[in-house]
Image: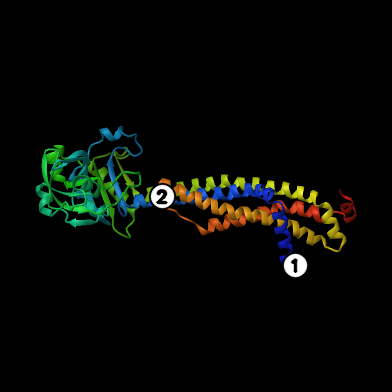
């Protein structure tokens, strides 16, 4: 019985193929928009989370300047950190895996006849552990090199590519401004960070080397603190804040002149934000499904009017009212599911093109696809019921007289 009803519905849809396609267009656009926007949103969210995770595991970044202050405001007048602050955090704070004082500047690196503008970082061995860096070849600094401020450096992949091409630079000499330096190690590539910066365009030297021969002072721009696995970053953050308030002699009730950023919190905040935005975009796109449903109801009412005599003949020869109701209801559902199927295909295709252009991963959620498809079917049921009920309630005698 159902198979016969389905066959009749498909025949009716095929009989007016152009009208059926235009009727389903609202459903097609709605489903495609929902699938496309949600897929792009999920890919963007995953890209942001992956970018932040590349900065380091359980990472806290401690920087001078009042929390929430404008760039160049309180930060520019706040007292800089020192290497002693990093040593105090490492010695007095529990649950800490690595503490790296960092100073940096833009510089010109010269190798032979080639030069390249890159970022020069002064730090110690904990920098590589805190930032989850891997050594591709060579080694990191020894304790004696760090203490003595030796003219040695570790180079990132982007800087290596521009200065040495594809060759291994370990053991080669370069010049950083006026300072000659020997490359002792090369870092594995990390790619772009969460905010689009190239993390591999970097050359790392011991902090004392940077301070004595490049900066000419003992300032530390910021301190990276990596918490141990299983340790609460919130507790480590609180302990660091209390210690630095004491070291910087900040009175009770006075505002901090430094900020501690928890990358875990930032990741969670960004994930929540992108999830909400994706949901809002999906909800806006879902409005097109309702518009498509109204279009289906409109066309089905027209179809009932056009086929009034046919309905009267079916009722006169013994068809039950529920069979007529089922026929038109199934026809509306077929239209909406047809639109949903095409919409899913178009949505995935557009999402694939968009994520390729944006450089984010393609994250397909089967539940979202299934939900959009089921919702399109539900639209057919809801908006097809009234025309189907109207057809079923026709008086057979009146229907047979209809011209």
What's the residue at 35%, 50% (across, down)?
A: 51
The answer to which quarter of the image holds residue 389 is bottom right
Q: Nearer the viewer, mark 2 or mark 1?
A: 1
Q: Residues within 10 Å of mark 1 (few under 14, many from 20)?
A: few
- Placement of 252 over or under 331, stated as above or below: above
Q: Residue 278's x, y, as percent?
A: 50, 47
- Which element type, helix, strand or loop, lies under badge 1? loop
The CA distance from mark 2 to mark 1 is: 49 Å
What's the residue at 65%, 55% (across, down)?
A: 378
* Residue 92 visible in the displayed image: no
Q: Residue 29's x, y, as percent?
A: 59, 47
Where is the N terminus found, in terms of image quarters? bottom right
- Which element type, helix, strand or loop, lies under badge 2? loop
Badge 2 or badge 1: first in the primary sequence: 1
Name the residue nearer the viewer: 286 or 143. 286
Question: In the image, 372: left or right of 147?
Answer: right
Name the residue nearer the viewer: 83 or 195. 195
* Residue 378 visible in the displayed image: yes
The answer to which quarter of the image holds residue 335 is bottom right
Q: Which residue has dot 2 on it?
A: 360
Question: In the image, 268: left or right of 87?
Answer: right
Q: Which residue has dot 1 on it?
A: 1
Q: Residue 146's x, y, as percent?
A: 13, 50
The type of colouring in the image is rainbow
Q: Residues within 10 Å of mark 2 (few under 14, many from 20)?
A: some
Q: Residue 177's x, y, as percent?
A: 14, 38
Name the residue nearer the viewer: 370 or 124. 370
Residue 102 is tagged as: none
Question: In the image, 126: left or right of 343?
Answer: left
């Amino acid at each position: 019985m159902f198979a016969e009803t389905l066959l009749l519905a498909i025949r009716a849809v095929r009989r007016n193929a152009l009208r059926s396609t235009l009727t389903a267009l609202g459903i097609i656009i709605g489903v495609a928009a929902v699938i496309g926007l949600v897929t792009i949103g999920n890919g963007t969210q995953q890209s942001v989370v992956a970018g932040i995770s590349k900065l380091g595991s359980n990472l806290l970044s401690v920087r001078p300047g009042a929390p929430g202050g404008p760039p160049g405001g309180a930060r520019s007048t706040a007292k800089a950190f020192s290497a002693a602050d990093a040593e105090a955090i490492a010695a007095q704070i529990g649950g800490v895996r690595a503490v790296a004082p960092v100073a940096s500047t833009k510089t010109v690196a010269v190798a032979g006849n080639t030069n390249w503008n890159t970022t020069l970082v002064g730090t110690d061995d904990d920098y590589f552990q805190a930032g989850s860096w891997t050594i591709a070849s060579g080694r990191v600094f020894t304790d004696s090199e760090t203490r003595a401020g030796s003219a040695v450096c570790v180079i990132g992949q982007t800087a290596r590519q521009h200065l040495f091409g594809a060759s291994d630079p370990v053991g080669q000499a370069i010049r950083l401004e006026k300072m000659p330096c020997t490359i002792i190690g090369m870092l594995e590539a990390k790619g772009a960070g969460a905010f689009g910066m190239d993390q591999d365009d970097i050359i790392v030297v011991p902090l004392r080397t940077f301070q004595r021969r490049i900066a000419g002072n003992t300032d530390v721009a910021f301190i990276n603190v990596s918490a141990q696995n299983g340790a609460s970053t919130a507790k480590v953050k609180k302990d660091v804040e209390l210690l630095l308030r004491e070291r910087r002699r900040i009175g009770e009730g006075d505002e901090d002149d430094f900020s501690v950023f928890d990358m875990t919190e930032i990741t969670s905040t960004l994930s929540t934000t992108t999830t909400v935005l994706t949901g809002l975009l999906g909800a806006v796109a879902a409005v097109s499904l309702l518009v498509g449903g109204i279009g289906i109801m409109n066309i089905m009412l027209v179809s009932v009017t056009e086929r009034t005599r046919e309905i009267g003949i079916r009722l006169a020869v013994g068809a039950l009212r529920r069979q007529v109701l089922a026929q038109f209801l199934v026809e509306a559902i077929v239209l909406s599911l047809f639109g949903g199927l095409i919409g899913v295909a178009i949505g995935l295709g557009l999402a694939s093109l968009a994520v390729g252009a944006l450089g984010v991963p393609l994250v397909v959620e089967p539940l979202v696809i299934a939900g959009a498809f089921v919702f399109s079917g539900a639209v057919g049921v809801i908006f097809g019921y009234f025309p189907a009920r109207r057809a079923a309630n026709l008086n057979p005698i009146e229907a047979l007289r209809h011209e």
